[in-house]
Amino acid sequence: MSSVAVKAHTRQGVEISYAWLLTGLSLLVAAAFVASLLVGPAAIGAKATLFALFAGTQSENDAAVLIVREIRLPRALLGVLVGATLGLSGAALQGYLRNPLAEPGLVGVSAGAALGAVTTINTGLASAFALALPLGGLAGGLAAVLIVQALAGLRGGPLTLILAGVAVTTFASALMSLSLNLSPNPFAALEIVFWLLGSLADRSFTHVWLAAPLILPGLAMLLLLGRSLDALTLGEDGAANLGVNLATTRVLLVVGVALCVGAATAVAGAIGFVGLVVPHLLRPLVAQRPSRLLTSSMLGGAALVLIADIAVRVIAPGADLKLGVLTSLVGAPLFFYLVMKTRRSLL
Amino acid sequence: MTNPMITTKQVSVELGGQRIIDGVSLEAYAGEVVGLVGPNGAGKTTLLRAISGLLYPVSGSIALEGEDIAQMAPRLRAQKLALLPQDHVVHWAISVEDLVALGRLPYRGFGAALSPADRAAISNALAAMDVADFAKRSVIELSGGERARALIARALAQETPILLADEPAAGLDAVHQLDLFGHLRGLAEQGRCVVVVLHDLTMASRFCDRLIVLDHGKVHASGGAAKVLTSKVLKTVYGITAYRGTADGVPFVVPLKTLAETSTTARDAADRSN
């Protein structure tokens, strides 16, 4: 009897620590969000920022209100949306494919979205009207996911999904290289390269309103996957025996990833490593349970992207350091560390 | 007899255009351990997967407690039948306790915490398979046999009236094999229906109430071990000769030679002795 009581107690302990983890990550996101509102080339104090955000009207304090509400707020909001997307879709894909190396780009959506966006730059549509670029990205992402689904089939397993994703990604990358190769002038080529690096700079509420209606339902669909992903720990037969509908699981996963990753790439470009590293870092903290990795990776991704986006503004204020470059720069060494740690644990 | 827990009627299954199961009709009842034996490739695993609803027969019907499996909601099916697959796969390094808790998924609502019933089922399953001592340890730290027992505990935690196990004894040492089969018998005595795929014919004779011999997707023979595991059946189905006998009233089968090895004269002698 006493051993049962001990078990119940420790189990409760685990749950409390999960609650603490989510609380801690939420606080981190909130702090990074506020910090993101405070950082920028224009020095606006904390009090002035708060005033500009909530109380100020355009006439009273023109510049500060404009900067905080129209430049920093959408940038921080996009940071949350894009980061949450990358963290959550990385965790969901790793759980579904049961492979810790899976990342949001794997199913071809980000390459498709990037190609769509690049095409609008290349054809001059992007300079003709501002929304052409993200809309092109969305169209590209949608096309990519439709092709991947058609290739992989609805009943196919994870392997066919990976293969189809790799095929579509490779082809979209080839087309991007082609459009760089044949770009009408060096400026267009430079614009394409810079856009591909990924950034949240100079985004407006237009981008937020474009991305949020797609990202939010996408995130919601992925958050529904917890049970199925836990069950998939036992393989597909094991999961099916536990009453998991594998076809529904796969549709939720693919559509969810397509919606949020497609929209995030369309407004922010390709931001690497977040979707791969965040679930990796958090996995030991949730005792490797795929369901618990979902919400925590969503928060972790949002925090990481917000912090990285603050860092690009602080480290190189005038140089326009791209967010995607920084996340890869910081993410890759973290991966070195993870490789060493895994190697040690195997010896 | 009471109503069967599992009924298959003329079930045929095709995989990749090939007929793996060919018109199998069988019944399994509450309170019995049914052994499914037969050579590799006879269709034992495929039959278990079909009964579990993991693949669809091209013809015939399968019913659990009289209810057609094709009409059954997946979650309801999961509350009726637990499957212990052959491969001992666990993809993440979760703890034994979390692994066993997966067996409670069919009973839990979205995001719901473990109920007292869930906790009781988990600790019973952990105790039954003698894995409670390493409940907190990660699955990857276990030996093959310990992992096999943890996975069986997972299936037990599902608390279903029907348990299908595909070679549950593979990788277990002698003590844990006897323990496992003793436990499966115990489940049957509690009124559950247990169907086990087995390669060890002695274990099969010792612990199963009934054996079903599957060959090339068809039921070749079925009944008690003494009736089913005759030299003739062993010869035609497995292509072996075997030494058969009883020890303490329990039949045993020791495979001796394949027919290819057996010389023509020896084969003739064996034929004459039948």
Image (spheres, coloured by chain):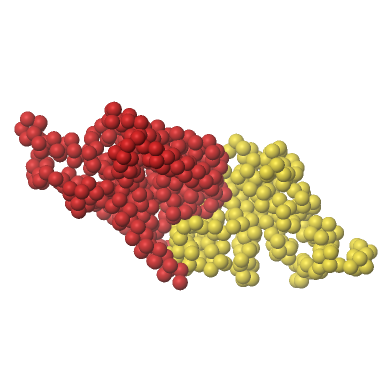
- Check the image and report above or below for B130 versus B74: below
| Left or right: A242 in relation to B185 | left
Chain colored yellow:
B
- Check the image and report above or below for A259 versus B51: above
As drawn, the residue found furthest toward the left would be: A60
Chain colored red:
A
Q: Quadrant of the C terminus of chain A?
A: bottom left
Give the residue drawn at x 17%, y 49%: A317
Q: Quadrant of the N terminus of chain A?
A: bottom left
Q: In the image, residue B133 lies at what x, y percent? A: 47, 68
Identify which residue, B15 or A193, lies in the foreground. Answer: A193
Give the residue drawn at x 36%, y 54%: A277
Give the residue drawn at x 39%, y 41%: A181
Q: Could one spot residue A184 in this view of the protein?
A: yes
Name which quarter of the figure residue B171 lies in: bottom right
Identify which residue, B120 or B76, lies in the foreground. Answer: B76
| Left or right: A336 in relation to A167 | left
Q: In the image, residue B84 lies at what x, y percent? A: 59, 55
Identify which residue, B155 or A184, lies in the foreground. Answer: A184
Q: In the image, residue A283 lies at what x, y percent? A: 38, 57
Give the residue drawn at x 81%, y 68%: B257
